[in-house]
Amino acid sequence: MKGVGGVRRIKAQAVKLCGILGGGGWLAVFASGAFFALLAVLLEGRMYGLWFSDLLFVERMNWPLLFGAAAVAVVVLLVTVWFFESIRPLIFALPLLALAFSLFLALCSESSVYFSLGLCVPVFFALRWALGESPPRLGVARKIPSWAVHSAVVVLFLLFTALLSYASILRYRSYNATNFDLGIFAQMFEFLRKTGHAWTTLERNTLLSHFGVHCSPFYYLLLPFYCLVPRVETLLVLQAAAVGAGVFAVRAIAAHCFGDSPRAVFAACLLYAIHPAFLSGTLYDFHENKFLAVLLLWAAYFLLKNKSAPFLIFAVLALSVKEDAAIYIFSLGLWQLCRTGQAKKRRLLFGLLPVVLAVLWFAAAVMVVRHFGDGVMLSRLRNFFPQGGMEGGFGDVLRTLVSDFGYVILQVFTAEKMEFLLWMFLPLGFAPFLAKRNAAWLLLLPLLVLNLLSNYDYQHTMGFQYTYGSAALALLLALLCLGRASPALRRKLLLYGIVGGLLCTAPLSGQRTQFYLHEWRVSRTDYLQADQVLSALPEDAAVMATTWFAPHLAARREVYMYPDYYGKAPLADIFLCKPEEPGESAELAIFLAENYHLQQSSNMVAVYRVND
């Protein structure tokens, strides 16, 4: 009788468990077990040098581990669901295990937006099920005090700044940073500190003011920080902190758009911090464009709040970054002019003011660049010059844009630019496409003009400096659209965007960071020895070097880069390169044989002296 009673109790518990799970719950349990098991065999394969992209991985599959791990995970989940008498543990377990599986693959893979999109699919389905099965009480947010949200945002800012500073400094210290764009600015700041002028010999291989290439008075605001600690690392930390500080502007905009929804506000900050346009680009040396995001987001916030004085301050600061920053302020002004739901007088004030300001600044900046150099770099749009030639002006570009719209479509809708749009909008949960008001699309005008019209590859490639302003306005549009969406849809798109951001950023930044860590750990002695070799060079000697050494020679007055793209550099007293570089470039080998002789060589640097 006791045995019969025990069987009945087991049956009753089994029926109870089935009632808790339902059909979808059982599927979620087995899917969770599968993700856990796949993650286990991936980790084991990684330990033995096997990887999923090689079919040898399948031939050497540890089947006992696969099925054993799946069985253990399924049993643990069933016991947990039975113990809590709720499906809630499974609601968290399935998306987290799916994300862990996809994130592991992303971290150890080469960057491909299509691969990242594929990795998003299982996580999206897991989230879709979890959000659909959430008990009503799970969706009711407890009141979170504002100080808690602010503290979380501060922690996010500190983490972003610390991690990106560390990775950027590792890139520099391991001789992976380049002349474009760290060497030129490192030398420029040394000239600024010593003379007050933005001179550099590295930018065009002759002594030239940086204002002859770009009009960037914003650098003078950074100069006091550099003067306190005059090191290249200071620039990298300042840059990481400035990009990271954008989370505070996003928090302010999200609070304005979402109202009393602290979880959504923090999710919006996460959306910013992990977006590849902001995170991965910060790893690439130093550039003024990276300061645009925080300045534009604050300008947009004060525009939303109709606060003219703070808006003007941040608009002017954004304009001071570069001559083409005018298009971002111009875009904000057009958007404000065309917005509905505001008094006409206010729309005109906050619309016409930035438009006029942007036009005047751009005209003045163009004259400054023309005065100090050869004019603005309009060659990036030479695909719109007459017959695709090297010579052309603004009039030629405008004439082509207006008269041949078919050609414009042909230039914009290319495979690589569509990939760029996926990189941009997948980490935003495609929220900008919810825009119902036509005026909102004006915020994407810089994306079209600066990133999609040009055929210059870096303009539409993630991981470089040309995404910061466009991505900031795209994020602004996403937040505005999410602010008008229902709370349920907003929650879903924020979660989808965070997942998309993680899985897009991981392959873009993960591989690079792992590489810098590995290089520093394995070859640290060689890098420190190279530092000593460079510091022992005569102070008054003119030096020419390949791109890797330029950032480490910034304190010198006369440094030139090889190859000499501009044909202006004199023959320097000393030439520096990596020992293997002459063997990799016949042109370099001939140049050295004709002009220099080897003085000393180490694992990292070869020093050549000019022939007498």
Image: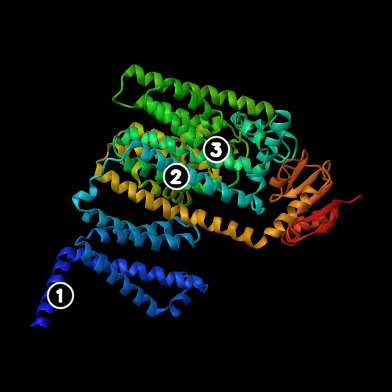
Task: Provide the secondary structure element on which disc 1 rests.
Answer: helix
Determine the image quadrant of residue 380.
Answer: top right
Give the residue type that dot 1 points to.
Ile
- Any part of residue 154 in sight: yes
Task: Provide the secondary structure element on which disc 3 rests.
Answer: helix
Q: Look at the image and tell me in which quarter the N terminus lies.
A: bottom left
Mark 2 and mark 3: Cα distance apart in space? 22 Å
Earlier in the chain: of badge 1 and badge 2, it is 1
Residue at x-position 47% and y-position 69%: 53
**Residue nearest the observer in this picture, 306 or 93:** 93
Q: Mark 1 points at which residue?
A: 10
Vertically, is 100 above or below 335? below
Give the residue type that dot 2 points to.
Leu
Earlier in the chain: of badge 2 and badge 3, it is 2
Q: Name the residue under label 2.
A: 156
Q: Extreme right residue here?
A: 612
Q: Position of residue 571 (x, y in %)?
A: 82, 45
